[in-house]
């Protein structure tokens, strides 16, 4: 089984990006340009490697290969995005990989691209400055539009296979990773379980008991064998159910209008461990948007717009306006869930102003955008 942390190190040993791997400092699929560029690179890598995996490593400085990390990014619906915009889409996964030298809130993103063999991938429809029907291919470190014979381009299989073979897990890596997790998460009651005499899962989180149930926040879960990390923030509540064959997580989100916040189930993630030394991860969206009185929403939506305009003009805010600003991301999100379509664009428009105004409010903004991204691509 591949140790993803070791795989990233072996990929970076190829100092220059090439036709089977790319590296990025950060990822932004919340904007059309960032989404288009990611899809272009996925398309080009799939076409350049019709018989083996390709990879994109995110959180690495381009010049010196320094691993700087990025925020945890749980875009589990990236495959739906790829399916929507690419013809003959490859199978794509996004995983968060922890590194010991990074701060606890930073990971390295790993995008794995498995192509449809001998089928040309192309852009399905117009996006940003790219046109529907365009085919991309890698020339060195650059993804270019091009026409080519895909059969003649299988030049990387031996190299990729060698890298993957050198990235297999071993007992030392497994034990080191378990001890590292148990030591760094001592404050949140770390524990582990072995599945099928092979897989090791470690997890830790703040416990909260409510009646007969136990919920967690600030949850870290690591699939030790592959060094894949799942993370849930302070703003989430999570229930965990464990059987002999599976590890199941239900994520709840705390959203609503001022003075009326509730927890709603968002997503169920079930990791099923198989006898064949494999595991499957199944994700199911459970979320049903709460509905509110439209007159109240119109009032809050207009108030948000006025507050955003004051923020854009740099007007000094009153104490009450500062409190309203704290609720602005969640209120826009609720408005969007209640068919105020422009609320999503207003939320995106607010990003740079909230980021510059207050770190804590910007954290709330990112949480709401994460929820929106999950729902949109489900």
Image (tube, rainbow, N blue to C red):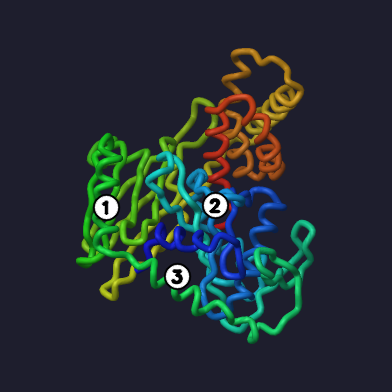
Judging from the image, what secondary structure is the residue with disc 3 in? helix
- Residue 259, x across and y down, in percent: 50, 25
Residue ranking furthest to the bottom:
151
- Residue 219, x across and y down, in percent: 35, 43
121 left or right, relative to 180: right
Q: Say whether disc 2 or disc 3 marks the residue closer to the N-terminus.
A: 2
| Image point (69%, 65%), residue name | 143
> Mark 1 = which residue?
176
Q: Does 371 sit above or below residue 350? A: below
- Residue 55, x across and y down, in percent: 53, 65
Q: Residues within 10 Å of mark 1 (few under 14, many from 20)?
A: few
Q: Say whether disc 1 or disc 2 marks the residue closer to the N-terminus.
A: 2
| Image point (69%, 64%), residue name | 142
Judging from the image, what secondary structure is the residue with disc 1 in? helix
> Mark 3 = which residue?
163
Judging from the image, what secondary structure is the residue with disc 2 in? loop
Count the marks: how many? 3
| Picture quadrant of residue 84 | bottom right
In front of the other: 210 or 376: 376
340 left or right, relative to 204: right
Alpha carbon distance from label 1 to label 2: 24 Å
Quadrant including the C terminus: bottom right
> Mark 2 = which residue?
65
């Amino acid at each position: 089984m591949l140790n993803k942390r070791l795989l990233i190190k072996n990929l970076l040993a190829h100092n220059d990006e090439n036709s089977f791997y790319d590296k990025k400092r950060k990822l932004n699929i919340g904007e059309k340009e960032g989404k288009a560029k990611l899809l272009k690179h996925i398309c080009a890598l799939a076409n350049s490697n019709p018989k083996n995996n390709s990879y994109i490593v995110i959180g690495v400085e381009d010049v010196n290969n320094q691993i700087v990390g990025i925020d945890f990014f749980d875009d589990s619906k990236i495959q739906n995005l790829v399916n929507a915009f690419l013809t003959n889409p490859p199978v794509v996964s996004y995983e968060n990989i922890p590194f010991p030298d990074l701060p606890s809130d930073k990971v390295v993103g790993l995008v794995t691209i498995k192509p449809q063999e001998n089928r040309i991938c192309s852009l399905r429809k117009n996006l940003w400055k790219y046109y529907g029907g365009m085919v991309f291919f890698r020339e060195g470190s650059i993804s270019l539009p091009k026409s080519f014979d895909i059969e003649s381009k299988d030049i990387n299989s031996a190299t990729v296979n060698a890298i993957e073979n050198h990235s297999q897990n071993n007992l030392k890596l497994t034990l080191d990773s378990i001890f590292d997790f148990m030591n760094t998460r001592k404050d949140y009651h770390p524990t582990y379980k072995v599945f099928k005499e092979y897989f090791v899962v470690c997890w830790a989180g703040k416990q909260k008991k409510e009646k007969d149930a136990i919920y967690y926040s600030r949850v870290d879960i690591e699939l030790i064998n592959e060094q894949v990390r799942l993370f849930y923030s302070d703003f989430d509540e999570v229930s965990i159910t464990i059987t002999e064959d599976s590890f199941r997580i239900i994520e709840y989100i705390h959203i609503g209008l001022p003075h009326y916040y509730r927890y709603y189930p968002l997503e169920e993630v079930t990791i099923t461990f198989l006898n064949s030394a494999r595991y499957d991860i199944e994700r199911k969206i459970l979320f049903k948007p709460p509905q509110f009185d439209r007159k109240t929403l119109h009032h809050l939506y207009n108030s948000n717009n006025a507050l955003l305009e004051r923020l854009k003009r740099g007007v000094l805010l009153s104490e009450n306006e500062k409190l309203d600003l704290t609720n602005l991301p969640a209120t826009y999100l609720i408005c969007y869930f209640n068919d105020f379509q422009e609320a999503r664009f207003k939320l995106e428009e607010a990003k740079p102003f909230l980021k510059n105004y207050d770190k804590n409010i910007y954290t709330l903004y990112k949480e709401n955008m994460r929820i929106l991204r999950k729902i949109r691509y489900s």
